[in-house]
Amino acid sequence: MRLFEALGVQRGDVVAFTGGGGKTSAMIRLGNELKEEGWRVLATTTTRLAESEMELFPFATRWRANLLRGSRELAQMLDEHGFVFVYQQIRSDKVMGIPDEYVSRLVDEMNADVLLVEADGARRLPLKAPRSYEPVWPLDTTIGVVVAGMDILGQPLDEHHVYNPQPILDRYGFPYEAPIQPAWLAQILRDERLGLKDIPPTARAMVLLNKADSPLLEARARRTAQIILRQPRVDGVAIGNVHNPLEPVIEVQQRIAAIILAGGMSRRMGTSKVLLPWGDRTVIEGIIQTLLPFRLADIVVVTGHKAGAVERVLQNYPVRTVYNPMYAKGEMLSSLKSGLRALKPEISAALVVLGDQPQISARVVRHILTTAAQRNDTLVAPYYQGQRGHPILIPRRYWRPLLKLRKGAPRDIINQQPITCVSVDNDSILRDIDTPEKYAQEKRLAGLE
C-alpha cells in the first residue's frame, strides 16, 4: 500500500508531520508518490530541517515576500518540477521554515493540490516528546501524522534514544533508562499532551509506526496500534517502512465494529433462529463467542423479533443491542441501517454478520480483517466458487448510500462498490439456518448431534 492511500490524502489537504523515526523521509515519500500521480505538491516546514535533508527534495526555493503577489514564479516551478520545497533561509546548516502566517496562502493562492509540512524536529531520534513550543501545527492542517520508529522498542528511555524524554518520565513515571515497551510507546503516541499535543481539532489524526521491517516488528507494531486506537482521537495507525521501494505501508489498523443482524421474524423456521440451541449456548451466543477474540471496537446486535429474550441472553456479554422497530417488514436493509446509525463516529468500518450463521469461522473473520487492513479503500467479502457470502466488511465511506437507500436490499448498493474478494475453501459463508431442516443439517456438520 502506498503512503497516500494509507493516509487517505485528498486534493486540498494540508498534511503535517510530527514526531520522530522518519518524519522527513515520510513527507518526502508522500510527496514523490503524489507527484507520480500527477499532483502539484508544495512542502515546507514550520520549524527547521538539516541543510543536507533539503537535497532530498526534487526542487527547493527560498521564500520571498513577493513570491505570491501576482507572480507566476512559484506556479512555474510547480509546473516544471511537480514537487517543490519552500524555505525562508539557511542559517548554521539549518533550513528555516517560512513564516507561519504564510503557510495557508501557499495552497490558497498557488493552485497546488496539497501542502506537506514538517511541524517539529527530533534530531533523527526514533521517538520524541514535544517541548513547550512544539509542535507548530499549521491552523489549516487537515491530516496530522504522528511518526515513531519501531526501532525504539527495547531501547533505553533516555536522552540518547528519545528526544526530550523528561515530559514522558514526568507524566507516566516510567523508570529512567528502562527498555521501552510497546504499551509505553502506544501511551506516548496517543497522549494529548505528548504525541497528539495541540493537534488542530478539525484535523484527522493518524499515527505512522515506521521501520516495521521484520515480522517480529510488524507483530509488535500491530499490538501497539491496538492500544493506540483506544484513544478515539486517532483515526488509524499505518504500519510499515517508508524506505521500502515497493510497499511503504504494510497495513492500516483502524477501528472495526461488528453488526450482527438478529432481528428477523424467522417465519420459515417457526421460532427465533438466534435463540435456538447451539451446543451449550444459543446461536447468537455462538456467533458472539467467535467474534470476541478479535477485540473489535464494538459489537452491536440489532434486535427486533423476541428482542427482550435476546437482550436477556446477552446481558453478560460485552455487546450492545439496538432495537429495529421496522423488523416486522422482514427487510435486512432496515436492520443494517439501525446498526450503522448506532456506531460511534470513530468507527472506520463495519463487519456485517448474519444472525443465522452460527457456523461463522474465525479463520474467515481473520482473513477478512487482515485483508481490510491491507486494502482499506474497498469492501471486503468472502467468496466460495464465485459466490459471495457473509460476513462483509463495509468501510465508512460506503455507509451513506446504504443509509440513503429507501427500499430494496443492501446488495443493490454493495454491488455498485469496489469489493476485494477473499477466497475461502468451504461453503459455510453461504449457508444459513432458515428452516428446521437446514438447522438440523448445520448441527450435524458442526458435530453437535
Image (tube, grey):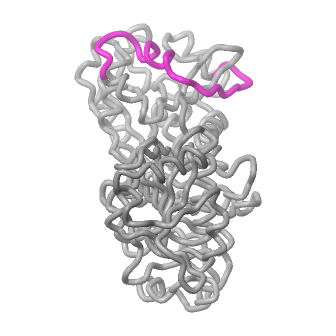
Q: Is residue 416 left or right of residue 141?
A: right
Question: Which residues lie in the magenta part?
Answer: 404-428
Asked if residue 197 lies in the magenta stretch, the reply is no
Residue at 31% in and 11% down: 407
Q: Nearer the viewer, residue 98 or 17?
A: 98
Q: Along the horizontal axis of the image, is 306 left or right of 112?
A: left
Q: Residue furthest left?
A: 325
What residue is drawn where x is 55% and y is 83%?
A: 163
Q: How many marks?
A: 0
Instruction: State the image coordinates of residue 397 (x, y, percent, origin top left).
Output: 42, 33
- Between 8 and 252, the one lying in front of the other is 8
Q: Nearer the viewer, residue 58 or 200?
A: 58
Q: Is residue 277 above or below residue 440?
A: below
Residue 181 location (% of width, % of height): 61, 75
Task: Tell me if 405 is positioned left or right of 93 in this view.
Answer: left
Q: Is residue 424 above or below residue 370?
A: above
User: Is any part of residue 399 visible from this angle?
Assistant: yes
Residue drawn at the location 25% of the way across and 19% of the way down: 326
x and y percentages locating residue 81 in the rendered image = 60, 49
The answer to whether residue 146 is above or below residue 41 is below
Magenta stretch: includes residue 409: yes
Quarter holding the N terminus? top right
Place residue 328 in its image quadrant. top left
Q: Residue at x 58, y 89 (%)?
A: 159
Residue in front for this viewpoint, 355 or 252: 252
Left or right of 208: which side holds 55?
right
